[in-house]
Image (cartoon, rainbow, N blue to C red):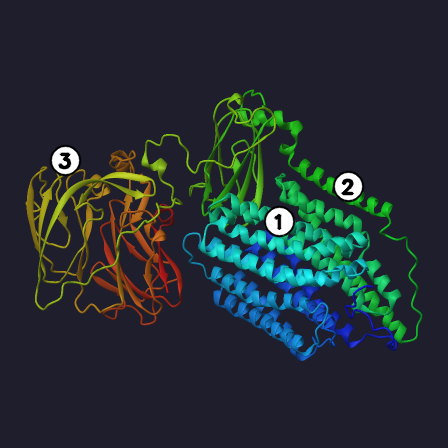
Amino acid sequence: MTTNLSLSPASGSAPKPPGRSPRSRWHLGVNAIVAVWLTLFAAVGSAHHFLPHAFWLLVHVLLLGAVTNAIVIWSGHFAASVLRLPEANRGAPAALRLVCLNAGAVGVIGGMLFERWYVVLAGACLVAAAVTAHAAWLVRLMRRALPGRFSMTVRYYVAASALLPVGAALGVVMARGDLAGDLSERLRVAHETINLLGWVGLTVAGTLITLWPTMLRTRVADGAERAGRTALPVLLAGLGAAVTGTLLGPPPLAAPGMVAYAAGLVVAGRPWLREARAKSPRSFAAWSVAAGCGWLAGSLAVLAGILVSTTSWITVGERISLLTAPLAAGWIAQVLLGALSFLVPVVLGGGPTAVRAATASLELAWPARLAVTNAALLLCVLPVPSTVRVACSVLLLVMLLFFLVLLVQTVVRGMRDRRRAAQGDSVPAAAPAEDPARPHRVLGGVALGLAVVMLAVAGGAAADVRSLPILERSAAANADGATVTPTGRTTTVTVTIRGMRFSPSSVDVPAGNRLVITLHNSGTDTHDLVLETGARTDRLSPGHTGTLDAGVVGRDLDGWCSMVGHRQMGMTFTVEVTGTASNSRTNSGGTVHDHSGRGTSTATKDTAAEAFDPMAEPAAGFTARNAQLPPATGGSGHQVHKKTLTVKEVTREVAPGVRQKLWTFDGTAPGPLLRGRVGDTFEITLVNDGSIGHSVDFHAGSLAPKRPMRTIKPGESLTYRFTATRSGIWMYHCSTMPMSLHIANGMFGAVIIDPPKLRTVDREYVLVQSEFYLGRQGGTADAAKVNAKDYDMVAFNGYANQYDHDPLTARTGERVRIWVLAAGPNESSAFHVVGGQFDTVFREGAYDLGGGGAGSPSGGAQVLDLAPASGGFVELSFPQTGDYPFVTHIMSDAERGAHGVFRVR
């Protein structure tokens, strides 16, 4: 006896008159929401190259939009059915939950598209509220109902609904950003685990206990209810262990939880296998659900392998993206479309004949469609040429659109026939058709589907002839420039884009091997990879993956990102040949999978300029130079400031991996900051512990330069005494010739003399900009470059991009003052805070804006422009939390290291 899911009138009841019942009208209306989201998903898939966050958008339109609506709609229907209660999931409360859910989904997606975190937060709260209200309604149903054979399935729905708000909260935290270390990857894995395996997985598992045998038109297997009750706590325990391990430990700690979850599915699924053996699937609905479950099983196995085989969550984050298509399209989408194919004809109603006609319409050519969908998806996840992957993606999109067309056609035809019947008109009888599940029709349809996929593969391969093995020898000529004997082996390398850098940035390939590069874009911009031979990937949006087949390689090759300006910003790549075919790490034939490429080339880099990478990260534990400015010494009257400056020659890191031997005041470049007020006296003792002559020139003092600014030999000292008579930020520097070289090699600093009645602010920072003319690693500045003004790097406070890695801080509403000095020796500064506006500008001893009333009261400024050796300060308040970059708006200099961040809380 088949399970009664209340999908048809109870036996013995009077037949309903023709026309749409309230149940049919309700389901047609709410399932139209699902169809709209699926249509939007198809539209996003068609236009994803032109949309921001396209990969994220595809996933969330499908899962948050279509799937979440389907779960809320149909879990209520099935809950009422198994509890043998009137279907109460209609009317104003249910409609309000759906309105709240869809408003929240639109808010989340719109907030991400327009980068408005508070909109994402509001949308997530609406989604969580709608699902929580749905769970509360399910609990009330359970309390009203008498114990039933399959009432445990409702517990699956309640547990799933309790998990979604947790997953949504993790998503909101990720959308907020500003996550240190690998926390973003941990949260992402936990978010996907809870939402995919919890919210969707538990719902599917609970539904299939009764829906699967109904699809097969067979009895529920003995022990199915016991298996369902046993599986639920196992599934929940596995989810809990996996999420806990993800958040608190290394990847292997999360693997047992995934295995436990898979074990729970095995417990729940054993009766399903017995039911399938009793009566094999013979419809699109059943085979689509079965194929989806197969993709889930394979994905869980791969995921467990990823977790066990790596200790880095960043690596897990890179690899787990490969499972998005199998889980979203292979599992969830196929289960959804299969369920809709079975359920929509039933809710349309009209009697057995009408249901069979609607089912036949939705299952048109189903063997071919299933074959196309699953074969094309399999090729999409395999390392095939990008043009083949594009062709297969188009086939998947066509299959979805084909289903939507069939769905609309079926609904329209069913409504038309019922309207005719209600008016007393005759309804054309459907022509008898041959059973589509007969073996020869199924096999013929599968063969047709596979043939379509093979045509797509052939077309994709023809569009990328480098992928054809017969042209491998021709590719060898392109990649070698001379004759090289192919070895028959393939070196496969995975390269990831992080920020504006390829990682690894170079790979080793045995001479004669074919090179295939899988490029994954984990950055936030569009990128590609082009080799000098002309081989290239497609341009990849964030989150996308492409393949480059370089052919047989016989010489070193250079590569780069071809997007405008990206190569100049350091997005370069090198292929290095490391010997002959006999050096290969394999015995004979086969494929070499090399994922151990180096992050940087081992070639000797004699100059620091070659080692400078604007996108490089400093070592763990890096702390930027303290830019916070201490207040001037208190007390009334004029102060005397005594300071000894000792010339020291020190080797310091000035950028990640870049070291220079600097000439410094007191071991730092810039030298120590001095601060006082107008009328204060400074008594400076200069001690030369260097190896050559040095001197010092204080711009803050006004006096004859001959004696106090003279050059002193190593081991000598002098006293420099001056009184500050005017306010401003003043440069001091070594004035020994060649002065440009001494300043370029670190001999400069700042003296701040406060203007009278300088108001108190909440935070005060000082930034000294200078440029570097890098010499050899560990050596001094290149004098020829200094003379030619050919600088390599620009920095604030002596280290490139240091405040990107260790941001300056502030709070919303605080008044922040930033003193800036352009130390040069040759280049000016145009200081700017991205997202900020200056309401006060003080430059070279006078207010340009604010302060003493200069400028318009409603005026503002965007840049503090400073020539070499000039300075001033700006003031602003930050209106919102977030990261506010600061730069010199001489943008080439900002891209060479004059860049930092204010982190505002």
Give above or below for 519 relative to 358.
Answer: above
Choose the circle earlier in sequence order: 1 or 3. 1
- Name the quadrant containing residue 358: bottom right
* Point 60% across, 56% down: residue: 59
- The CA distance from mark 2 to mark 1 is 26 Å
Q: Which residue is mark 3?
A: 691
**Which SS class for mark 3?**
loop
SS at circle 1: helix
Which mark is on residue 299?
Answer: 1
For residue 74, side relative to residue 345 (left or right): left
- x and y percentages locating residue 708 in the rendered image: 7, 47
- Quadrant for residue 837, please give it: bottom left
Image location of residue 469, percent across then percent down: 65, 29
Task: Give the image quarter of residue 407.
Answer: bottom right
Which dot marks residue 451? Answer: 2
Task: Report the quarter where the N terminus lies.
Answer: bottom right
Give the x, y percent position of residue 41: 65, 58
